[in-house]
Image (cartoon, coloured by chain):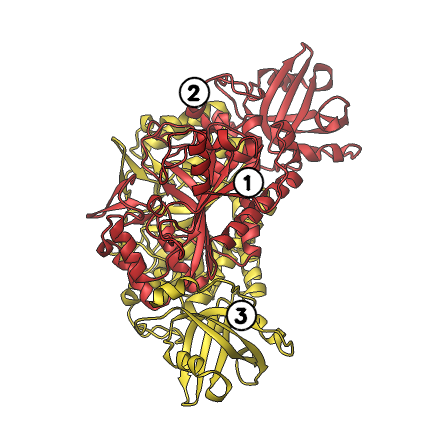
Chain colours: A yellow, B red
């Protein structure tokens, strides 16, 4: 039986090369062993071309009836697109094909034969089928060139964030995702059965990262956050990855400076490491100038009111309005909106000493998309309790948090940044689900 | 009011130095500004010594009545241990103190005065109070030197894992933590209310990482896993961090080789970067020799039976037994137990082609502690469905997973490694809660 034979598929066989290394093997008289999946097939009768794809690219396998055994030629004719295969063969120079070389096979092993045709083309730049069809078969969908580029960019973003923060003396932490108390009020939480108790999934690591500045000064966490928002927009997920940063002995101005330098570092690293992906996606990354523009919340409200918009001080500013008012000033650019009304922000944000109706807070925007928000935090217990009460929260529920404020919590500030939002901003992908491996929303819990 | 004055504490003030940089400033005539918390105080009447701690170490602030203003001296006398402070002053050489220098203050700002004495000494090597007392005030507990060393070691472990896997061409992924179906059977899951449905917290990213080898070949994830185990042992948590690795076109032998090289890299990096911490903890890291010893499960059972133990082939081997039988062979060392009975392992693990009662699996042990387990995985749908049925699982429940097996899933293998377990093995800390920032277990959901 096929299955049993395949049990032995890797025995005495190890991959020797990836596709991108093949060209370097031309002229050597040794054999190569490459492994991947069948991206496409062209049948020219006595010649069968198989394009093998691995994690680095593609290589052509050229199977000529005259050049190989009957059984090998027969096998090559049987192979289906998407099958997982290995090829042992010789490298031959060949212009006009990827990597300038083709493989003349001596042996082909079909590790796993595809049984169905994929419902979409992996080569096509944009998808020809609906998002739900693709998400239902996400692992296959992720073989598309387009998503390959997106997720390689995501990888570079993550790596450069970690590198940047390590250079800035930050320590990476992991805080619990199962919590007893709602962080920022009771809205939008997923309840859990925690043994015999009720618990919740954390909507942010906010209070933990603040506490940890007591011991470690500068901390960051990159991990999942959970929001039970019953929305169906293109920019909300029920589970997302948040980059959370918190630092002792600084205020929100220092944090904005840190954040914009981090964005600059990301963009520079992408330009350096992901040129091919940026070209494939036809993306021109914005040229960054620091500092980013800062717009005062109150000034924006003034401008909008003068322009005849029906908006009051204290209202939120919709992405559409922001985009319309600032688009001519900010093609492709990032900018901050600062000094929001205290009433619009969570209890832990520090009101301004000069005017406590506004607080030391910012949102980082990219065009109309909110990418991050941050602030100076309150580091005094009395003030924190007072703000909780004003927002209708019960200080008793935060006892485990408030008690550490008796032991010298330093002045601190920080931000939370939505990784998927940032990737959207950088890649101009319009639906957040496309920059997420396995998205979760009100309608989708699988795969 | 104090609080209002403190609002302005950071205005026009930025930290210029960390404690470890102070010695370098001796001789310069400029001022330094340092920030941290008060680790200890010695009151000698007309001289007050304040030991300021920051993320790098300690520095002595020497406040002499004759050398400063009355108000500054008065303030220095008022400061309590644990308070968060900033000091502007001159550096003066001073033998016999940390960093060979002391600070003569010109200005001290108390950012946040401690209101209570901590219930434990931060300087003491071992804790003098119970674990629960410390965990209830964890952020303060984390100021202890001992835990500082543990978590700096944790940081190096994480960084070296990421570096090692990136060098080995792995891509970091994040898979969903809210899932519709139990991964490895229905035991030990936390249920969630997911909008109008029931869902579960993922006990591992197993099936997702396997799928992703189709598209990305080599993937890893470092993230939370959730296990509703009602156990109260020293080595189980309800929420832990798992390092999950999966790779296409390899088998369990390749993966064991990868894993032991990763452990070697971690140990070498620790020896290089965390000398001070290892010294403080009086730790001698094992000298690693590759490959690690491999013990065949069946051979161990034979040996145990010959030694008179009442154990049957197919039984689990308890850590105590492992430790007693192998201790003389493995002082401080890691070793593998391989080729476990198929019936003892999850459905996705590939039975051996030679004898399907055993499977291509391993556990990585450190003395009696299981640190990791891994295996070659099944990559054929029929075989996977058959194994599911044998373990009493319903293939229909895994429809979203099984469907991708129609599109050429490559041969693949991988492992899951408990980060906290690894830190325990490396640091010889006996309770897993001590190597976790905010541990979760059946009794603890806060802070």
Give the chain of mark 3.
A
Label 2 and label 3: CA atoms lie apart by 59 Å
Q: Which residue is mark 3?
A: A33
The picture places residue B240, in percent across and down from the top left corner, at 41, 39
Residue drawn at x 60%, y 76% as measured from the top left: A23
**Image quarter of residue B54:** top right
- Residue carrying label 1: B155
Please determine whether, in this image, residue B199 is positioned above or below residue B365. below
Mark toward the viewer: 2 or 3 = 3
Q: Secondary structure at mark 2?
A: helix
Q: Which mark is residue A4?
A: none
> Could you tell me if residue A76 is visible in this image?
yes
Residue pointed to by mark 2: B133
* Mark 1, secondary structure of its residue: helix
Is residue B200 rendered to the left or right of residue B140?
Answer: left
Residue at 56% x, 80% y: name it. Answer: A101
Tell me if label 1 and label 3 are in contact, CB under 8 Å: no
Which mark is first along the chain, 1 or 2?
2
The N terminus of chain A - image quarter: bottom left
| Image vertical order of residue B212 relative to residue A209, above or below | below
């Amino acid at each position: 039986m096929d299955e049993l034979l395949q049990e032995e598929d890797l025995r005495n066989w190890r991959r020797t090369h990836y596709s991108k290394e093949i060209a370097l093997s031309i002229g050597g008289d040794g054999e190569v062993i490459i492994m991947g999946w069948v991206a496409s097939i062209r049948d020219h009768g006595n010649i069968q071309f198989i394009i093998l794809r691995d994690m680095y690219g593609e290589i052509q396998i050229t199977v000529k009836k005259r050049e190989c055994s009957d059984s090998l030629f027969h096998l090559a004719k049987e192979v289906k697109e998407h099958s997982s295969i290995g090829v042992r063969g010789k490298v031959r120079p060949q212009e006009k094909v990827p990597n300038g070389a083709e493989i003349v096979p001596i042996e082909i092993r079909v590790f796993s034969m595809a049984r169905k045709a994929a419902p979409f083309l992996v080569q096509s730049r944009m998808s020809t089928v609906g998002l739900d069809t693709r998400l239902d078969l996400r692992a296959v969908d992720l073989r598309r060139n387009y998503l390959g580029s997106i997720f390689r960019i995501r990888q570079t973003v993550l790596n450069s964030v970690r590198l940047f923060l390590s250079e800035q003396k930050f320590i990476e932490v992991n805080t619990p995702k199962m919590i007893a108390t709602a962080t920022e009020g009771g809205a939008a939480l997923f309840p859990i059965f925690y043994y015999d108790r009720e618990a919740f999934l954390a909507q942010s690591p906010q209070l933990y990262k603040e506490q940890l500045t007591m011991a470690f000064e500068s901390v960051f966490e990159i991990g999942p956050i959970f929001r039970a928002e019953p929305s169906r927009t293109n920019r909300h997920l029920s589970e997302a990855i948040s980059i959370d940063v918190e630092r002792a002995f600084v205020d929100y101005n220092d944090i904005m400076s840190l954040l914009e330098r981090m964005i600059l570092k990301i963009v520079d690293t992408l330009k350096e490491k992901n040129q091919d992906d940026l070209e494939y996606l036809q993306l021109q990354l914005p040229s960054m100038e620091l500092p980013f523009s800062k717009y005062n919340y109150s000034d924006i409200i003034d401008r909008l009111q003068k322009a005849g918009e029906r908006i009051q001080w204290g209202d939120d500013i919709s992405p559409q309005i922001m985009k319309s008012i600032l688009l001519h000033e900010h093609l492709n650019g990032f900018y901050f909106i600062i000094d929001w009304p205290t009433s619009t922000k969570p209890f832990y944000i520090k009101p301004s000493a000069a005017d406590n109706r506004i607080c030391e807070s910012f949102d980082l925007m990219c065009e109309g998309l909110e990418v991050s928000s941050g602030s100076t935090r309150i580091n005094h217990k009395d003030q924190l309790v007072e703000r909780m009460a004003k927002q209708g929260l019960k200080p008793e529920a935060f006892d485990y948090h408030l008690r550490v404020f008796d032991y010298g919590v330093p002045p601190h500030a920080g931000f939370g940044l939505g990784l998927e939002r940032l990737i959207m901003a950088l890649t101009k992908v319009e639906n957040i689900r496309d920059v997420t491996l396995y998205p979760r929303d009100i309608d989708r819990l699988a795969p």
